[in-house]
Image (cartoon, rainbow, N blue to C red):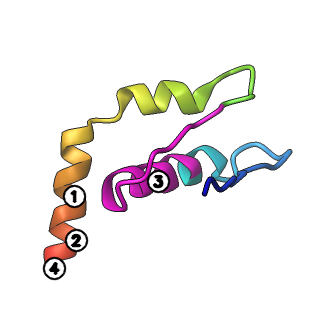
Amino acid sequence: MAKLVSVVGQKGGCGKTSTLIIMASMLAYEYKKKVLVLDCDTIQQTISKLRELDLQSLERKVEKNENG
């Protein structure tokens, strides 16, 4: 069953993009879930940050945290 999660707020600089990237990454790589990220902001900062993300580095960090 699909679930919808929204990260919204009118104020800039309160961590919406960071929260969304971390949450989407954890769902995709740690929990093996399919994730669709929609960025409705005209600046599309979330999409540009996701493109910069080094996925192999993220996987190593997740594995390191699991192993202590």
Q: Which residue is mark 4?
A: 68
Q: Amino acid at mark 4?
A: Gly
Q: Amino acid at mark 1?
A: Lys
Q: Position of residue 58 (x, y in %)?
A: 26, 49
Q: Residue at x 40, y 57 (%)?
A: 26
Label 1–label 2 contact, CB within 8 A? yes
Q: Name which of mark 1 and mark 4 comes first in the sequence.
A: 1
User: Which residue lies most toward the front here?
Assistant: 1
Q: Which residues are magenta?
A: 20-38
Kindly report the distance in space between the C-alpha atoms of the residues bearing marks 4 and 2. 5 Å
Q: Amino acid at mark 2?
A: Asn
Label 2–label 3 contact, CB within 8 A? no
Kindly report the distance in space between the C-alpha atoms of the residues bearing marks 1 and 3. 12 Å
Instruction: Using the image, determine if residue 53 lies above or below residue 44.
Output: below
54 relative position to 22: left or right: left
Label 4–label 2 contact, CB within 8 A? yes
Q: Which residue is mark 3?
A: 22
Q: Residue at x 15, y 79 (%)?
A: 68
Q: Name which of mark 2 and mark 3 comes first in the sequence.
A: 3
What kind of element bears circle 2? helix
What kind of element bears circle 4? loop
Judge by depth and name the residue closer to the eye, 37 or 1.
1
Q: Which residue is mark 2?
A: 65
Count of marks overlaid on the render: 4
Instruction: Using the image, determine if residue 56 lies above or below residue 28.
Output: above
Q: Which mark is residue 61?
A: 1
